[in-house]
Image: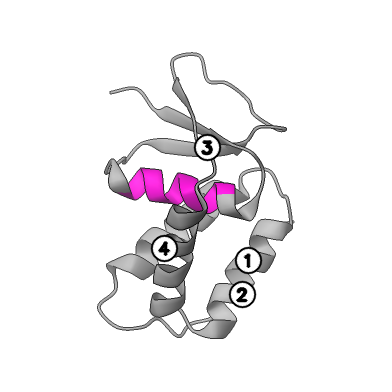
């Protein structure tokens, strides 16, 4: 199966809408990219994700239920860093947090540089 590239509008709600899409479609091999920095893969299937505030709010509520308030806001600040590839790193982090039974208290330490 080819990898799927999800292209979103660059907003945090757009990113959360893409996260919703990943979980809703149970995607394993996926890359999330901002429409302003997108690099298309040779064999990747491209899907444009449109921002859906209701879905974004649902994902954010779920994130806040799994992470401490500090952890959820650090996730947000990491997103704001606009580093290339931060979306995929945050997707992995969110997948891990959602896989845990209890609220995850650990603080996210992402090396961005």
Q: Residue at x 30, y 46 (%)?
A: 24
Please say whether residue 109 is visible from this viewpoint: no
Q: Would you say residue 77 sits in the magenta stretch? A: no
Residue 32 drawn above or below residue 104 = above
Query: What is the magenta range?
Result: 14-23
Q: How is the image coloured?
A: one colour
User: Which residue carries the number 3 mark?
Assistant: 50
User: Which residue carries the number 4 mark?
Assistant: 58
Residue 21 drawn above or below residue 103 = above
Q: Which mark is residue 76?
A: 1
Marks 2 and 1, how far apart at CA? 5 Å
Q: Is label 3 or label 2 in front? A: 3
**Viewer-proximal residue among 70 and 60:** 60
First-in-chain label (2 vs 4): 4
**Viewer-proximal residue among 78 and 113:** 78
| Label 1–label 4 contact, CB within 8 A | no
Q: Residue at x 61, y 44 (%)?
A: 85
Q: State the image coordinates of residue 87 (x, y, percent, origin top left).
A: 57, 49
């Amino acid at each position: 199966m080819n990898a799927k590239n999800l292209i979103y509008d660059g907003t945090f709600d757009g990113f959360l809408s893409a996260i919703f899409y990943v979980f809703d479609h149970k995607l394993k091999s996926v890359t999330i990219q901002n429409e302003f920095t997108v690099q298309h893969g040779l064999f990747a299937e491209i899907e444009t994700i449109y921002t859906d505030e209701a879905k974004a709010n649902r994902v954010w509520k779920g994130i806040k239920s799994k992470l401490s308030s500090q952890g959820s806001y650090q996730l947000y600040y990491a997103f704001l860093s606009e580093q290339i590839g931060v979306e995929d790193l945050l997707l992995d982090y969110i997948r891990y947090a959602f896989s845990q039974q209890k609220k995850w208290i650990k603080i996210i330490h992402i090396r961005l540089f």
